[in-house]
Each structure stands twice: as structure tokens, then as C-alpha cells.
Image: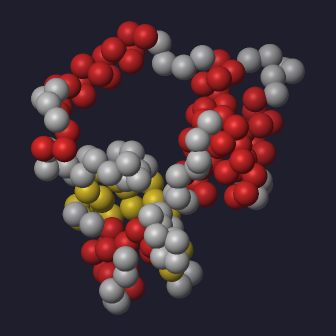
């Protein structure tokens, strides 16, 4: 990077941009509609894409190795037959979901077979939301991944 590099400024601007601007940047950079995920997810994916376009993406050997690991993990077969949930709207493994509830910030990590909260595995976000609030919630709505008025 040079001192005249505009990329750090673009990345910093993501933090203060309105969500509507983030969604427009998504459309511009990915040529698709933005997913219904929370703001932090959009920021992180946009930041990666901006850097990828400016500095280049993964090296071909890295892509090949990741594909090999995926085949190894999933057997190269039909992913729908796996016990794992492969929903197009499901956040990618490693994504951190953040939710503030009654003044406390809760962080849930997406794992390959569910979710992790406070070091404990959960199969659903609804179970975590229920534990946090003490009432029944749709976990996708509670963590801002789905608008309960709009649907998925």
C-alpha cells in the first residue's frame, strides 16, 4: 500500500455509512441483491470485496486447496444429503452474530453444525434466543437475519 491508497479510507467509511448505502455498495460490488443479514455482516463482506478487487483475491493454489478440503469434509457428494444445513441464507461458518438485549451484548458464532454461544453448542438460534430472553423467539428474527414482517 502506498500513502495515496484510497482503500483504507473506503474501509473506514463503511463503519459510518447508513445501511441503505451499504446495500447499494453491495449491489455495485457483487451485482446482486444484498442478503438479509445484520449490518456487521454487510460491513465485513464489503470490506473483503473492496480489498479483493483492489489487491487481488485468493491465489489459485489457495482456492484449489480450499476446494480439496471441502471435498474431503463433505465427501464430494450431494451436500443436500449431509446432516449439515446448507441454506443459502445461512451465514458462513465463523460469522459472529451480535445482538444487544436489555443493555447486554450477546455474541454467537456460526459453526459448521450449528451455533456456539458461551462455549456451548446449539442446533438453533431460536434455542439461544429463548435462553437469553426467557421467551420464545424466532432466532433468525432475534439476531436480525430475517425481518419477521418481510419473510426470508
Work out whether 71 lies above or below 16. above
Along the line of sight, the residue nearer the viewer: 41 or 131: 41
Which residue is at 32% across, 74% downward?
126
Kindly tell me whether residue 120 is visible in this rendering: yes
Q: Is residue 23 left or right of residue 94?
A: right
Q: Is residue 121 left or right of residue 30?
A: left
Which residue is at 48% across, 76% downward?
148
Work out whether 27 lies above or below 126. above
Which residue is at 30% across, 59% downward?
116
Q: Quadrant of the N terminus?
A: top right
**Horizontal and vertical percent for residue 80?**
19, 44
Along the line of sight, the residue nearer the viewer: 71 or 152: 152
Kindly tell me whether residue 94 is visible in this rendering: no
Q: Quadrant of the C terminus?
A: bottom left
Q: Residue furthest top?
A: 61
Q: Residue furthest right?
A: 4
Q: Is residue 47 left or right of residue 143?
A: right
Work out whether 24 lies above or below 79. below
Along the line of sight, the residue nearer the viewer: 127 or 20: 20
Q: Is residue 5 left or right of residue 56?
A: right
**Horizontal and vertical percent for residue 20?**
73, 57
Which residue is at 58% across, 54% downward?
40
**Horizontal and vertical percent for residue 68?**
24, 19
Colour option used: secondary structure
**Horizontal and vertical percent for residue 11?**
72, 39
Q: Residue furthest bottom?
A: 135
Amino acid at each position: 500500500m502506498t500513502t495515496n491508497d484510497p482503500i483504507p479510507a473506503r474501509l473506514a467509511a463503511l463503519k459510518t455509512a447508513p445501511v441503505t448505502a451499504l446495500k447499494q455498495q453491495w449491489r455495485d460490488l457483487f451485482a446482486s441483491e444484498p442478503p438479509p443479514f445484520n449490518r456487521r455482516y454487510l460491513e465485513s463482506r464489503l470490506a473483503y470485496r473492496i480489498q479483493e478487487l483492489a489487491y487481488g483475491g485468493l491465489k489459485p493454489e489457495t482456492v484449489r486447496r480450499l476446494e480439496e478440503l471441502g471435498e474431503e469434509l463433505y465427501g464430494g457428494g450431494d451436500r443436500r444429503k449431509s446432516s449439515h444445513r446448507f441454506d443459502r441464507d445461512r451465514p458462513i461458518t465463523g460469522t459472529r452474530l451480535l445482538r444487544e438485549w436489555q443493555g447486554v451484548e450477546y455474541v454467537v458464532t456460526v459453526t459448521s453444525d450449528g451455533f456456539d454461544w458461551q462455549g456451548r453448542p446449539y442446533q438453533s438460534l431460536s434455542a439461544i434466543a429463548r435462553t437469553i430472553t426467557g421467551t420464545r423467539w424466532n432466532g433468525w428474527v432475534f439476531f436480525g437475519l430475517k425481518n419477521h414482517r418481510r419473510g426470508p
